[in-house]
Structure formats: C-alpha cells, structure tokens
Image: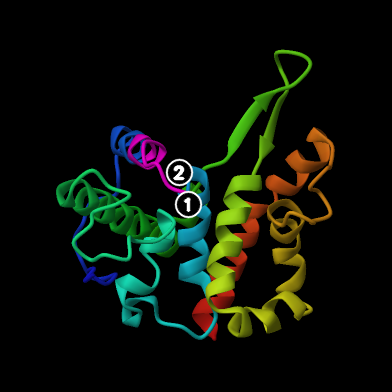
Amino acid sequence: MNYPQYNPASDNRPLADEELNDLDELLAALHADGTMNIEALDGYLAGLLLTPGRNLAALPGADWLPVVWGGDAENPDDNAPFASGKQRKKVVMLVLRHLQSIATAWAQHPQGWEPIFSFADGEDEDTEYADAEDWAAGFLTAVDLAPNAWAPWFDGAETGPLLAPIAALGSPDGALAEGSAQDRDEASRTIPDAMLALWAIRQKS
C-alpha cells in the first residue's frame, strides 16, 4: 500500500487539542493488536525523528506508518483495521501533522514542547505523578526499527544517560517496570530535557 512520506518542508498546521483528541479516539477505536495510543504514538514519532544517521524524509511511509496501528492487512484491498480508506487517510494525515509539529517545536521553540504523558493523582490533591511508560514504549518501538543505529547512543557516555530513563520505563524488563509512582515520576520528568539534548546532538552529527 502506498503511503505519503514525511515532508519537513510542508506547511501543515500543528494539531489542535481537538484534533489530538480525535486522533486518540480514532486509534482507540481500531480493533487490532499493537495499535498505539496517543502517548505511545508521541514517543514513537520522537524516536523516529531522533534516529541517528537517518533522514526520516527519505524513509518510505510504508516502512513506519503501519506500525502505528499494528500493521496492514495482507490483502491490499482490505482496509483493516480501518473501517474505510477514508478513515485510514485521515489517521495518516493526522499522524504526519503531529510528526511535523514535534519537529517544528524542537527546531523553533524547544522549551515550549511537552511530550504526552499520563498523570495520576497522588495521595493528596496537591500531588500528581507523571508516568511516561507508554511514551517510552513507543519511543523504543522506533528504536527497534533501527537497532544498529541506536546502539552507539545507548552505549555512549553522553547519550546513554539521556536514554536510560526511557529504557527503564518502556522496556517490559526495565529497571522501573515495577518501580514506585515517585520513582517513575522522577524518571518521566527527565525525558523532556533529555529529548531536547538529544535533538541538539542529532543536529550536530
């Protein structure tokens, strides 16, 4: 199946909050194994943009877009897991716009960028815990598409510590898979600055 490629020069608008909610609901309604929620998608797209040594604009959309919904049906005439070709197209365009919005934020106003995490109330009303497990799992899905490219970064003296919280939160056997809410919160809150630091390193490489 043919999919559009990511074009960083396109003039697509960033997704409004209503459109993000729409995308989240569209993905949640798909009856397929491996469909990402909006948090995992956000992490996945961040990982795609950061993949060392790879130009995402040169990567065919078919190589990474179907991963978002767990893959396409074997029969090219079958729209599964989508209800129609129109619904598939809508999801694809929303995903591409969200991808571009992340790249634009990192390039133009990085301190204003926020990843999409889950938050849970603590024991008192003034406490709120961030949990980036789904986001980190999505990021690691992007890593799995290019493990050889990522290996030096996970092992690197500068980049390894920046990626450590993602591995700890997003891997089934990660160090924080069974961690306390406070430990997971502390690790989750390091991710935004870590991503911006990795983006700066990526631009220099």
Q: Is residue 29 magenta?
A: yes
Quadrant for residue 198, please give it: bottom right
Task: Answer above or below: position of 111 versus 142.
Answer: above
Q: Which secondary structure, mark 1?
A: helix
Q: Residue furthest top?
A: 125
The stretch of residues the image draws in magenta is 24-34
Residue corresponding to mark 1 = 42
- Residue closer to the observer: 185 or 44: 44
Q: Residue furthest left?
A: 86
Q: Label 1 amino acid?
A: Asp
Residue 110, numbered label: none
- Residue closer to the observer: 87 or 46: 87
Q: Are marks 2 and 1 in contact (CB under 8 Å)?
A: yes
Inspect this view and state whether residue 103 appears: no
Residue corresponding to mark 2 = 38
Inspect this view and state whether residue 54 appears: yes
Task: Answer above or below: position of 137 versus 47.
Answer: above
Alpha carbons under labels 2 and 1: distance apart:
6 Å
Q: Is residue 106 magenta?
A: no
Residue drawn at x 70%, y 65% is 163
Residue drawn at x 53%, y 65% is 47
Name the spot of residue 158 as percent of width and height, x first: 74, 76
Count all numbered tags in the image, as a single digit.
2
Name the spot of residue 105 as percent of width and height, x first: 41, 56
Q: Label 2 amino acid?
A: Ile
Name the spot of residue 86 as percent of width and height, x first: 15, 48
Q: Which secondary structure, mark 2?
A: helix
